[in-house]
Image (tube, rainbow, N blue to C red):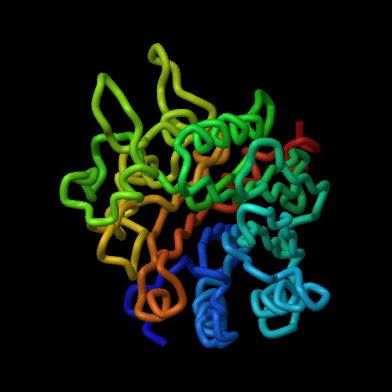
Amino acid sequence: MTTALMPSPPAGDDVIRVASWNVEHNGIDRTGDDTRWHTAMGVLAEVKPHLLLRQELTGAHLNGSRTLWAEAGHLGGDGDIQYFPFLAPATPESPNPTGVYADPRVFDVIAYYVHVTGMWHPVCNPVVRLKGTTTDLSIGSFHLCSHDPGKRASEANRLTTLGKPGMAAIIGGDTNSFAHTRIETAPLPDWSTIADRSYVAHRTIERDGRLVADTRPDEILSGQYDGQPSVFRELGHYAATVLRQQYSNPLAPTASLWRKDQGPMRRIDRLYATPQVAAALLKLEVINTEDVRRASDHALVLATFSLAKLRRALGWREAVLAA
């Protein structure tokens, strides 16, 4: 496996790693060849996320959810320990559901929700609790609509309910749209140069009488209104501006790793967190190794948090007892 671009997390158990990855059609080709799935499992075995937000878990519910449980076992070291797997349902519009895996050594599961109203892909939303803490952490894996900007905006508004006052949350996935800030390393598309004109229709909105790149979901989730921030902090932007990350480019584009008819790659896969959770972030990486490119048309996004800071943000019991 190519490892030159893989992360080098701090040693020991002082971090929490949260990954989000859209593995195209769950790594299984139309012929049934699952070579890409096995490649993806090798990548995840190196990353070792404590929470994994997945998109396009195509067919994972079949045969008693064997593929879902197999992935949960690979994350725990080929069956040494079984991660908690969660799978939202597929829909008549799309057979590519979202899912979440949680490390039982680190998290207790409190509840599980699926948000389906108005969703092209229902949001997979387990609620967990970091062991030793008192505050619930809501986890959301999403895959916004690929063809309807209006539906994407509605889906983003639904996701803001996971960050209501008093709640702590990490959400992430494939936004099928663009970041709204001006510091992106990949500029917005020049739509006149895009060969795929249906893609242009799907990824643009009208503003001031002209077509512009659809940045509405990112604005809804992490923009500012009248000088006040929205519900979430987008972790790539947070790493670049607040942390001034030098380790690697947190704003690196994520898709498409395969297609060439939709213009240059863009950063459409993103992770978001409520402010108290974002404050525990150490770094945000976009992993784009040779094996990642073999497995999927999307790069893997990995957020590394300080365990100590995350515990404080989520109500570490020792602090409560000391008080």
Q: Of residues 291 and 315, which is closer to you in this image? A: 291
Q: Position of residue 52 (x, y in %)?
A: 60, 61
Q: In which quarter of the view is residue 2 placed?
A: bottom left
Q: Is residue 245 left or right of residue 159?
A: left
| Count of residue discs | 0
Q: Is residue 229 left or right of residue 159?
A: left
Q: Position of residue 287 (x, y in %)?
A: 39, 66
Q: Is residue 39 left or right of residue 237?
A: right
Q: Quadrant of the N terminus?
A: bottom left
**What residue appears at the point 68 percent right and 54 percent down from the top-left corner?**
92
Q: Quadrant of the C terminus?
A: top right
Q: Of residues 183 and 280, which is closer to you in this image? A: 183
Q: Position of residue 319 (x, y in %)?
A: 72, 38
Q: Of residues 242 and 322, which is closer to you in this image? A: 242
Q: In which quarter of the view is residue 84 placed?
A: bottom right
Q: Position of residue 90 (x, y in %)?
A: 69, 57
Q: Report whether residue 318 is seen.
A: no
**What residue appears at the point 83 percent right and 48 percent down from the top-left corner?**
110
Q: Is residue 282 left or right of residue 321?
A: left
Image height of 95 relative to 146, above or below: below
**What residue appears at the point 50 percent right and 77 percent down from the top-left corner?**
43
**What residue appears at the point 59 percent right and 44 percent down from the top-left corner?**
170
